[in-house]
């Protein structure tokens, strides 16, 4: 089953309005708590470029999309969970 076909349970985290580095700290703490079959959905005010390197180093996949309200929705998951 691919990551796209897998049924995910999203865990939501809104870090809007927070100043760096607090959003990254909260995101990394939340990633420590996700279970197999879960992914983290983050609402954030700016695209978190420094976070992408951290995610890649730790084996996480991610996708990001801009929302109509000028925020970003970031999805983070562990690809090996889909295997």
Image (cartoon, rainbow, N blue to C red):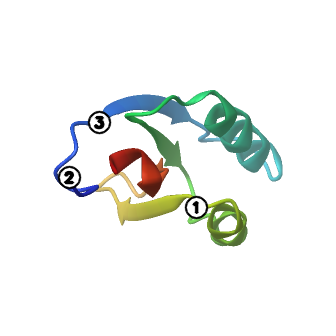
Q: Is residue 59 above or below residue 31?
A: below
Residues marked 2 and 1 touching at CB (< 8 Å)? no
Q: Position of residue 16 (x, y in %)?
A: 59, 41
Left or right, residue 22 beside residue 76: right
Residue matched to label 2:
1
Question: Which mark is first along the chain, 1 or 2?
Answer: 2
Q: Residues within 10 Å of mark 1 (few under 14, many from 20)?
A: few
- The answer to whether any part of residue 4 appears in the image is yes
**Residue nearest the viewer, comparing 44 with 13:** 13
Q: Closer to the N terminus: mark 3 or mark 2?
A: 2
On the image, the x and y values in percent for residue 43 come to 48, 44
- Residue labelled with disc 3: 8
Residue found 72% across the figure and 37% down from its top: 26
- Badge 2: residue crowd in 10 Å (few <14, some 14–19, many ≥20): few
Q: Please, what secondary structure does the residue beneath circle 1 have?
A: loop
Q: Kindly report the distance in space between the C-alpha atoms of the residues bearing marks 3 and 1.
A: 25 Å
Q: Residue furthest left?
A: 5
The vertical placement of 35 against 51, above or below, is: above
Decide: few, some or many residues near mark 3? Use Cα within 10 Å; few <14, some 14-19, many ≥20. some
Numbered tag placed on residue 46 in the rendering: 1
Question: With respect to residue 54, does 43 lie above or below?
Answer: above
Q: Is residue 80 left or right of residue 1?
A: right
Q: Residue visible at 60% across and 61% down?
A: 59
């Amino acid at each position: 089953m691919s990551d796209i076909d897998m049924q995910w349970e999203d865990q939501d985290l809104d870090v809007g309005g927070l100043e760096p580095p607090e959003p990254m700290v909260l995101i990394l703490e939340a990633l420590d708590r996700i279970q197999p079959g879960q992914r983290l959905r983050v609402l954030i005010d700016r695209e978190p470029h420094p976070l992408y390197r951290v995610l890649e180093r730790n084996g996480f996949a991610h996708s990001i999309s801009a929302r109509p309200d000028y925020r970003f929705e970031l999805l983070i998951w562990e690809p090996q969970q889909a295997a």
